[in-house]
Amino acid sequence: MNRSRGRELVWELALVLVTVLWGWSFSAIHKALERMSDSAFNVYRFLSAAAIIVPVLVLKNSRFSSRDIVGGGCAGLALYLAFFFQTKGLALTSASNTSFITGLALVFTPIFAYLFLKVTPKEQHIVGAAIATVGLALLTLQGLSVHVGDLLVLLCAVSFALHIVILSKVSKNTNILNIAFIQVFVVGMLALFQSLVCGEFSIPADTETVNTVVVMATLGTALAFYIQTKAQIASSPNRIALIIVLEPVFGGIFGYFLANDRLTLMNWVGAALILAAMLITEFNFKRA
């Protein structure tokens, strides 16, 4: 294994650990959203994450270039839209449909990567995406009915795919810490605007919600999006999309053990297919 591939694996493994955290956070965030609006939660989550990054920026004497601001701003806008469409769609469709359709970002990512980055997907990435999509369906879908909420969540998947592609483009020639700060700050400010305009802003009044905000701001946002941005320097956008789709897998596993959610045989097969898809992307078809 050469040094370049070793560096890729290190950051890809770090991103896998991030998806473990995001999967664990499903139940905690769900409980928090019973006590406050999604926009208010995102205000505290993302602006707190931005505040956490500020001292590091000061210590490093960071300076923001126009590329940092534009790139981070575009990434932040795409990320905000993804969360906006996801939460609004979730109110109008099932959680299982939301998980599956959000995961379709792994299908849109190669398309956008080809259109905007001229990155031609490798055969193993195409096969992996197809298998992972089937796995997502088995893991999450409980019916075939389509609702308006499904279309909103589809826009969420498009936005997440755009976020991945934008990060792949801007992370190569910018300051990674600056990009991480700008994108979470933009999401927080847009969420603040939304919460104020829609009358959704509130202050968390219970310790459990505050603890959830703290964990998600520090580990699930500030550290997580720094790691994702670093990973996208080392790896392709198609690989990143396949790694991120592990989130519902870990969400299902944690739900099984921590929230007494029952997983059927079909669910377990779906999770196994997603993991198999990850391994397939490591296989070079042409060399074989």
Image: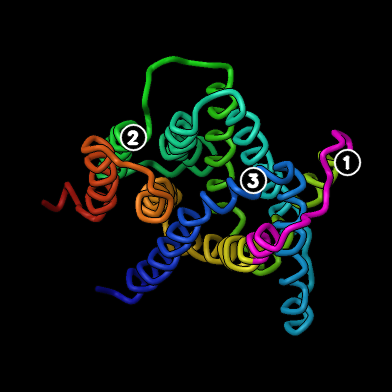
- Residue 137, above or below 175: above
Q: Secondary structure at mark 3?
A: helix
Name the mark on residue 196. Answer: 1
**Disc 2 residue type (three-letter):** Thr
Identify the residue position indicated by label 3 in the image.
Answer: 79
Residue at 47 percent across and 15 percent down: it is 146
What's the magenta region? 197-214
> Nearer the observer, disc 2 or disc 1?
1
Question: Who is closer to the viewer here, 58 or 250?
Answer: 250
Residues packed near mark 1 inside 10 Å, few (<14), some (14 to 19) or many (20 plus): some
Which residue is situated farthest in the left direction here? 288
Residue 253, position as x, y percentages in the image: 35, 52
Q: Secondary structure at mark 2?
A: helix
Residue 242, position as x, y percentages in the image: 38, 48
> Nearer the observer, disc 3 or disc 1?
1
Q: Would you identify the image quadrant in which residue 93 lies?
A: top right
Identify the residue position indicated by label 2 in the image.
Answer: 133
Q: Secondary structure at mark 1?
A: helix
Residues packed near mark 2 inside 10 Å, few (<14), some (14 to 19) or many (20 plus): many
Left or right relative to 249: residue 72: right
**Disc 1 residue type (three-letter):** Leu
Question: Who is closer to the viewer here, 282 or 275?
Answer: 275
Q: Earlier in the sequence, mark 2 or mark 1?
A: 2
- Residue 283, above or below 78: below
Query: Was residue 209 drawn as part of the magenta stretch in this picture?
Result: yes
Quadrant in the picture for the N terminus? bottom left
**Disc 3 residue type (three-letter):** Leu
Residue at 77 percent across and 45 percent down: it is 191
